Image (cartoon, rainbow, N blue to C red):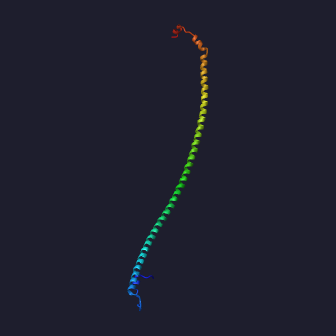
Amino acid sequence: MPLTPLDIHNKEFAKGFRGYDEDEVNEFLDQVIKDYENIIREKKELEERLNELTDRIGHYNNIEETLNKSIVVAQEAAEEVKRNAQKEAKLIIKEAEKNADRIVNESLSKARKIALEIEELKKQSKVFRTRFKMLIEAQLDMLNNDDWDHLLEYELDASELNSTK
């Protein structure tokens, strides 16, 4: 067990015939006691400072560990968000492709229907043209008929007009 300042203060030496000067020894011991007390006080202060710094290091280590965990959680969350965004993008692209195929198929179907309608209208216009031409030709034949000329040559008497009344 180490000496305490009290142990040094209370130390008694045996007196010899030609011993040391007691006052000089006592002064020296007093100086040793003061120095020893200073060293003990400094040691205690240093231990307290060491404990304080150890506590702070522990605190900073806890903060560092928490930050590291937070970074890991944030990275995992970012990866999850990224994966979800990629999945969603794939679904959107797939849906867009499906819609594009549907639109193309509907457009092709409508184009075929319109083409058929155009062909039908062409046939109907040919039939109409043919019938209209036949009607006009028949009317022209009637106009070119000699019966019109006979009608113009036919004269009515005024007496015939009165008798019919």
Q: Residue furthest bottom?
A: 17
Front residue of 117 and 32: 32
Kindly indicate the quadrant of the structure image that contains residue 125: top right
Q: Quadrant of the N terminus?
A: bottom left
**Residue 149, percent from left and from top:** 59, 12
**Residue 36, percent from left and from top:** 42, 79
Q: Is residue 145 above or below residue 40?
A: above
Q: Is residue 67 above or below residue 104?
A: below
Q: At 52% from the left edge and 59% from the top edge, which residue is drawn?
A: 75
Q: At 56% from the left edge and 48% from the top edge, which residue is drawn?
A: 93
Front residue of 55 and 138: 55
Q: Is residue 27 above or below residue 92?
A: below
Front residue of 53 and 135: 53
**Residue 88, percent from left and from top:** 54, 52
Q: Is residue 79 left or right of residue 6?
A: right
Q: Is residue 131 left or right of residue 14?
A: right
Examine the rendering and report whether any part of residue 6 can be seen.
no
